[in-house]
């Protein structure tokens, strides 16, 4: 197309757009309508529950935050959360109860609440009167009951519209507090389901930040006595190299240790809110914990050598916190309201005093930490030459053509950080990779093709990442060599066959991530693609149902009746590209890979991936034997 032709097309497009933009284009929406029309402005992304920050968890968090704020102000000692099979969520606290005369406004009118008054709510999270209203607008049904002084009052909304404004009723046996029940709207959160692991983690985090508070999830209790010390003790999947250092001060608490793992692991909180994306308080902590340690040893250590292998947590409380979004996952405040002290100075002064004193008084801990830093330094220097050569090999291999079919969002900007909807499928074999490549949404879905089974990297040092060509190219494709801040894809999806070889490849890849990039898993970036085992087709109506196990297959056969054909897929390569679109689009089933201390990750890896071949053989033989009558 010539320049003149392009300019002519642009002129026509502008004319059409101008004709459409008139008085009828200007609309005024009610606040609840606006939330439903633009939910992302209020709760971030939507999602289906496969990611920790999906909207359904934000709705849950918004309600619990209100109950936590009551506890923080000294009211109530327990919170009960129930999630039913029908996905109805119920939260009961024992705080002061929403003032009953304002209950309809508190639930259904934007920018209405008591938290604008700092004398009533100090150093809490929910400050703008939006959270409960967003829950209300984005749920098919929301029912709220307030109990105060032996009386109760209930209001009911459907998709943000008031349908019942109940009268006061006698409730002499009901403790004071608020009962909220809601069901997220499945027309907004399509195919959603609550992941038990994610909700349990949320409950644990609340407990760590509120020592003494009893939280219940479907009857299971979550409780902490020692706050962030309990957090690290309960969550670390590697043994600490020295006893966890734990400090509690006015409006600040920190816990610090190191382990043999690679990377850095942090937990950060503001006013009891889990800031999973960090912010100014975490940046200050990372800088000043390294600076304080370097000053203590009086050596010019590299900050990366000091922090590699660290597991730490920081919690601060400030007045009027500023977050970078409504979801409150990243702190933007630079000053503490009281006195105008900067967060940098607040964190720095605390660490300089407490951490420096601790290291002077605990010689064994100081020696263990020094040994860890020096080991990190030696490994970094030994990798320097290897990594430089590996980068050159990756560049010469031209991964964009040989291994990686990138998405258009990143193709022209290889250094771009991950974007919300970007995904990369890691698969093996030309046929499987070809099918996914042809059926993917090329705008945000990329494909990385493995050649055969990857190396078992259990027990190996990080040099193998550079020396093994497959790992080197995968690391380059993900852009995670230095840290995962540069990760180019929000979801890293392992897509393998559902047979023994496919399961083995899946295990080898997960071992790779657990060994060298565990923070990818901890931060919920790694997933397993579930692909159907069967296709059940009605020959007459041409209705097709894809089934992921034998039970689904049997139900599909019963539904379609006689005359059905059943196809058993042996591998991804057998699924046609036009069919694959069904499985990697809106209907995609992916399971997050999670790390929990109770899984004994290191022991599992040692048993299944270590050198104890005979033990594994015995285990397989014993478990393959049929049970005796």
Image (spheres, helix red, strand yellow):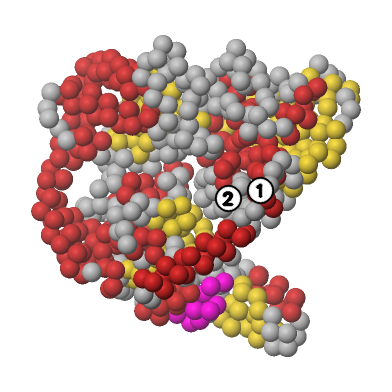
Circle 2 residues within 10 Å: few <14, some 14–19, many ≥20: some
Query: Residue 562 in magenta?
Result: no
**Residue 510 seen from this side:** yes
| Quadrant of the image occupied by residue 181 | top right
List the residue tagged with mark 1: 26
Query: Residue 619, image x and y in percent?
Result: 42, 62
Q: Give residue 197's position: percent from left, percent from top.
A: 54, 46
Residue 578 on the magenta span: yes
- Vertical arrangement, residue 39 with respect to residue 108, above or below: below
Question: Split into 4 quadrants, where in the image is the C terminus?
Answer: bottom right
Q: Residue at x 26, y 36 (%)?
A: 307
Up the image or down, 228 lies above or below 457; here it is above
Using the rendered view, name the quadrant where residue 137 is placed. top right
**x then y, percent, for residue 451:** 30, 73
Q: Which mark is residue 46?
A: 2
**Pointer 1 or 2: first along the chain:** 1
* Residue at 61% across, 72% down: 547
Residue 606 or residue 86, whichever sits in front: 86
Kindly report the secondary structure that dominates the magenta region of the rendered protein. helix
- Viewport quadrant of the N terminus: bottom left
Is residue 388 shown left or right of residue 365?
left
Q: Which residues are magenta?
A: 572-582
> 199 and 422: which one is in front?
422
> Can residue 221 be seen in the rendering of this structure?
no
Rendered residue at 41%/46% (across/down)? 522
In the picture provided, is 119 more to the left or to the right than 459?
Answer: right
């Amino acid at each position: 197309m010539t320049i003149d032709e392009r300019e002519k097309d642009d002129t026509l497009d502008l004319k059409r757009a101008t004709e459409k933009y008139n008085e009828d284009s200007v609309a005024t929406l009610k606040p609840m309508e606006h939330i439903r029309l633009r939910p992302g402005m209020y709760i971030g992304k939507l999602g289906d529950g496969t990611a920790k920050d999906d909207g359904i968890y934000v709705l849950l968090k918004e309600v619990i935050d209100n109950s936590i704020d009551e506890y923080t102000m000294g009211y109530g000692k327990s919170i009960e959360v129930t999630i039913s099979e029908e996905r109805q969520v119920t939260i009961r606290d024992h705080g002061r109860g929403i003032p009953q005369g304002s209950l309809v406004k508190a639930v259904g009118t934007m920018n209405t609440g008591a938290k604008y008054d700092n004398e009533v709510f100090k150093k809490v999270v929910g400050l703008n009167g939006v959270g409960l209203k967003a829950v209300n607008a984005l749920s098919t049904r929301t029912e709220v009951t307030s109990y105060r002084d032996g009386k109760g009052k209930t209001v009911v909304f459907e998709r943000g519209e008031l349908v019942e404004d109940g009268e006061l009723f006698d409730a002499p046996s009901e403790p004071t507090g608020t009962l909220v029940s809601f069901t997220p709207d499945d027309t907004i959160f399509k195919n959603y389901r609550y992941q038990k692991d994610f909700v349990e983690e949320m409950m644990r985090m609340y407990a760590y930040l509120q020592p003494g508070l009893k939280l219940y999830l479907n009857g299971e209790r979550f409780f902490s006595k020692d706050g962030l010390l309990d957090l690290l003790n309960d969550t670390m999947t590697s043994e600490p190299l020295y006893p966890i250092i734990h400090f509690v001060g006015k409006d600040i608490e920190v816990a610090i240790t190191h382990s043999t793992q690679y990377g850095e692991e942090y937990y950060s909180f503001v006013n009891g809110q889990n800031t999973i994306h960090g912010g100014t308080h975490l940046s200050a902590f990372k800088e000043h914990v390294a600076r304080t340690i370097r000053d203590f040893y009086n050596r010019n250590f590299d900050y990366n050598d000091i922090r590699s292998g660290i597991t730490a947590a920081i919690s601060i409380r400030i007045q009027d916190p500023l977050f970078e979004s409504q979801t409150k996952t990243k702190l933007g405040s630079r000053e503490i309201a009281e006195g105008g002290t900067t967060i940098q100075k607040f964190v720095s002064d605390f660490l300089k005093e407490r951490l420096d004193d601790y290291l002077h008084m605990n010689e064994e801990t100081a020696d263990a930490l020094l040994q860890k830093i020096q080991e990190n330094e030696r490994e970094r220097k030994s990798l320097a030459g290897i990594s430089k050569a590996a980068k050159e090999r990756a560049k010469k291999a031209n991964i964009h053509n040989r291994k990686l079919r990138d998405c258009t969002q990143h193709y022209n900007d290889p250094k771009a950080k991950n974007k919300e909807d970007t995904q990369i499928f890691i698969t093996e074999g030309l046929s499987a990779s070809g099918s996914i490549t042809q059926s993917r949404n090329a705008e945000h879905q990329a494909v990385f093709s493995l050649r055969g089974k990857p190396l078992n990297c259990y027990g190996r040092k990080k040099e193998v990442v550079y020396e093994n060509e497959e790992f080197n190219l995968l690391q380059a494709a993900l852009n995670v060599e230095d840290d995962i801040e540069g990760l180019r894809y929000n979801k890293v999806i392992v897509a393998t066959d559902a047979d023994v070889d496919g399961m083995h490849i899946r295990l080898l890849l997960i071992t790779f991530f657990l060994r060298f990039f565990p923070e990818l898993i901890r931060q919920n970036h790694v997933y397993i693609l579930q692909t159907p085992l069967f296709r059940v087709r009605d020959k007459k109506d041409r209705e097709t149902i894809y089934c992921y196990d034998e039970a689904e297959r049997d139900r599909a056969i019963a539904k379609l009746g006689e005359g059905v054909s059943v196809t058993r897929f042996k591998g991804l390569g057998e699924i046609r590209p036009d069919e694959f679109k069904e499985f990697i689009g809106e209907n995609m089933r992916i399971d997050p890979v999670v790390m929990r201390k109770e899984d004994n990750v290191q022991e599992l890896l040692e048993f299944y991936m270590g050198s104890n071949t005979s033990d594994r053989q015995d285990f397989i033989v014993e478990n393959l034997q049929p049970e005796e009558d």
